[in-house]
Image: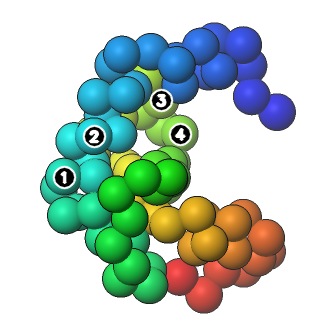
Amino acid sequence: MFTDDYKEYLKSDEWKQKRIDKARQMNYTCEFCGKIVVKGYHIHHKTYKHLYNEPLSDLQFLCEECHKKFHEEKSPVF
């Protein structure tokens, strides 16, 4: 599903910084359940339209459980 370029991007310093920026913006609080997550949080792409140059508004800060639930649901209630 994902290209090698995308997998490499997720290992990049740029992506790591973007994750930190989104986490700080959301005060480490899951956007769906409100759980505070300092370690093991997930950053979900709302869209891949701006992939490799995503504004923070294209990303969602999620706990692991909500991210898993989001991808398991065909029509998420989020």
Report which residue position mark 3 lands on. Answer: 51
Depth-wise, is mark 2 or mark 4 nearer the camera? 2
Q: Are marks 2 and 1 in contact (CB under 8 Å)?
A: yes
The answer to whether mark 3 and mark 4 are in CB contact below 8 A is yes
Label 1 – label 4 distance at C-alpha: 22 Å
Above-or-below relation of 47 to 61: above
In front of the other: 8 or 35: 35
Q: Can residue 57 be seen at all in this image of the molecule?
A: no
Q: Is residue 15 above or below residue 48?
A: above
For residue 24, which numbered disc appears in the image? 1
CB within 8 Å, label 3 to label 2: no
Question: Dot 3 lies on which element?
Answer: loop
Residue that numbered label 4 is attached to? 48
- What is the three-letter code of the residue carrying label 1? Arg
The residue positioned 27% from the left and 40% from the top of the image is 20
Q: Amino acid at mark 4?
A: Tyr
Sequence-first disc among 2 and 4: 2
Instruction: Tell me how far mark 2 sits from mark 1, CA to CA.
Output: 6 Å
Give how far apart the Cα atoms at labels 1 and 3 are.
21 Å
Q: Are marks 1 and 4 in contact (CB under 8 Å)?
A: no
- Indicate whether 3 appears above or below 16: above
User: Which residue shows up at 33% across the image and 72% down it?
Assistant: 36
Q: Amino acid at mark 2?
A: Ile
Q: Quadrant of the N terminus?
A: top right
Viewer-proximal residue among 62 and 35:
35
Q: Which residue is mark 2?
A: 20
Contact (Cβ within 8 Å) of mark 2 with mark 4: no
In this rendering, would 53 be left or right of 63?
left
Looking at the image, is mark 1 or mark 4 earlier in the sequence?
A: 1
Measured Cα–Cα span from mark 3 to mark 2 = 17 Å
